[in-house]
Image: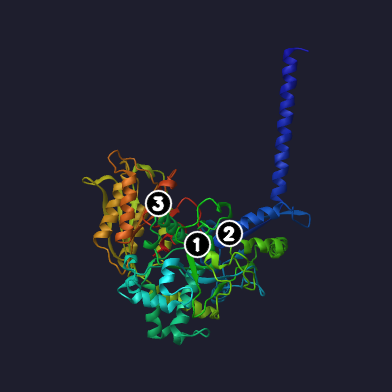
Amino acid sequence: MSTHRRGSIAVAAAFAVLITGVLTLVGREAAVTDCVNVSLASSQEKSTLLTQIAADYQRTRPSIEGRCVTINVTRQASGQVEQALARGWNDRTDGPRPDVWSPAALTWTTLLSLHLAEAGRPNLVPAGVTSLFRSPLVIGMPKPMAAALGWPGKPLGWSDILRLARDRAGWGAYGHPEWGAFQLGKTNPNLSTSGLHALIGTYFAASSRSADLTESVLSDPNVADFVQRVESSVVHYGDAISTFLVNLQAADDANAALSYVSAIAMEEKEVWDYNQGNPLGDPALYGQHLPPRVPLVAIYPKEGTLAADHPYVILKASWVTDAKRAAAEAFRQYLEAPPQQQRFQAVGFRDEFGRPGATVSTSNGLQPDGPRAYVQPPSAAIIERVQQEWKRLRKRARILILLDVSSSVAGANPRALQASLSSGLAQLAGDDRVGAWEFASHLSGQAPFREVVAEAPLTQTRGPLDREVAGSRSTSQPAELYRAILDAVGSMQARTEPGLINAVVVVTNGHSTAAGDINFSELLRQLQLASESSAVHVFTVAYGMKPDTVALDLIARASRGATYDANQPSASGGVFTAVISNF
């Protein structure tokens, strides 16, 4: 046989193998496409574990009427999903529509039913929603601080928090002036369950009730004063408890755990996570970081508390087909089976009746017999009113937005950023103060920045901010990023108001490209000093092509802030909904 002939046969054989491979891939793609795909939106504290369990479930080869089943778990804040469903889910801005929703608590399903009824839309929440497991709201406190208050022998609660918040001596009143003022970490009650439950619990404590919150109670000036004084002790808010726990872990690593925050309103399960050295609660990360030098302990409010009961809601929505519903129901049964329930209890959750597993122990800073009392969740209308009152009573903020207009962000989409910012600013009150700078290099003489919107109440700056962000364009100048951040922080420090949250929001791709910029290590050192001495925190937003997310995370952690990514999809209005939730 000729060489040419053998070569032709070889080519033909290779082509046949290639075609077979392509057809096999097409067949596999068709099979996957033909699967019943169930989208499950989960609250943060259990999302990673649910993802792992869903992967294990796939290995059992589940099927519905001969079709394979896939379960896709996404992490979304409970409040964000509620808001998106209430206004009519938009795939473009809110991401894939969930077939199953598992918020941290039934509180959110109650609110959703109310908001849909108010809008004249069909209720998406079925009757008889089941709970997967429970975790009570606690006040997580560094152990030495709790001991100074009388823990574990003395019952403690929100009234003790109020007493500390009101005392000008701060921790000095308990023999520890070196700990400074009392500082509370608390999430945004419009987005986060722990923040909402803490707010409701504070109202119950203020009114000395355990049930029957009413409009008249919420309108009582003494009750409002109690709530406002507790809110005044907040260091800043947040979209997730992990923001505080990651920063607390970093402070503990630096042997400064008692300098960051005095207490955090959080789930009991999250206390366990932190004490394992895993503030994100990711099962894959257990054992990768040493437990903290200063552990947290759980204080179960003596006035009573609420529980995150983690419901499993198969939505009554038009996009949830009979096949999706059957597949979702089969996965629910899998989750309720003893092997999976044991996995939940192994990471600090209680069972659906509130019974603790072995991990809920005094050695882990928890009390198996706590809480001593639960309060009765109020009606949806009262919960909605509580959220509205919080916007009036919460701690106010001063925010400086620092916009990168250097050549590093060429090609970015400012209009998309403006839409996200506009949605986020809607969360603020009219008297929150907001301003904006642009930065690159030598924008104003030798300075790398120029003021484009002077700091003023949001009622005056909202329009200029929208126009400035939408019309921003990258320049040919390099980015003198580190100096611009320090200048912004220095400006905030010079006019710091202790009664306000003082923060800088940096929108950048994280690359310093100016030859004369300051040293990165020096930036981090100065940011840490600013966060400790004057409580100015920096929140970073990754924006533009190929952002340096590692650098942005280090900047945020040094200043005890948080980092976000504008290039990643985010539910309910984009990344600034999460960013602004800190204020």
Q: Position of residue 278 (x, y in %)?
A: 52, 56
Q: Quadrant of the N terminus?
A: top right
Which residue is under mark 2?
47
Which residue is under mark 1?
572
Residue 205 tag number: none
Residue 320: tell me if it is visible.
no
Q: Position of residue 474 (x, y in %)?
A: 35, 45
> Dot 2 surroundings within 10 Å: few (below 14), some, or many (20 or more)?
many
> Dot 1 surroundings within 10 Å: few (below 14), some, or many (20 or more)?
many
Residue type, label 1: Ser
Closer to the N terminus: mark 3 or mark 2? 2
- The answer to whether mark 3 and mark 2 are in CB contact below 8 A is no
Residue type, label 2: Ser
Q: Residue at x 71, y 28 (%)?
A: 15
For the residues labelled 3 and 1, the Cα–Cα distance comes to 18 Å
Residue type, label 3: Pro
Tell whether 533 sits left or right of 428.
left
Q: Quadrant of the C terminus?
A: bottom left
Tell whether 157 sits left or right of 308.
left
Q: Is residue 51 above or below residue 26?
A: below
Which residue is under mark 3?
414
Closer to the N terminus: mark 2 or mark 1? 2
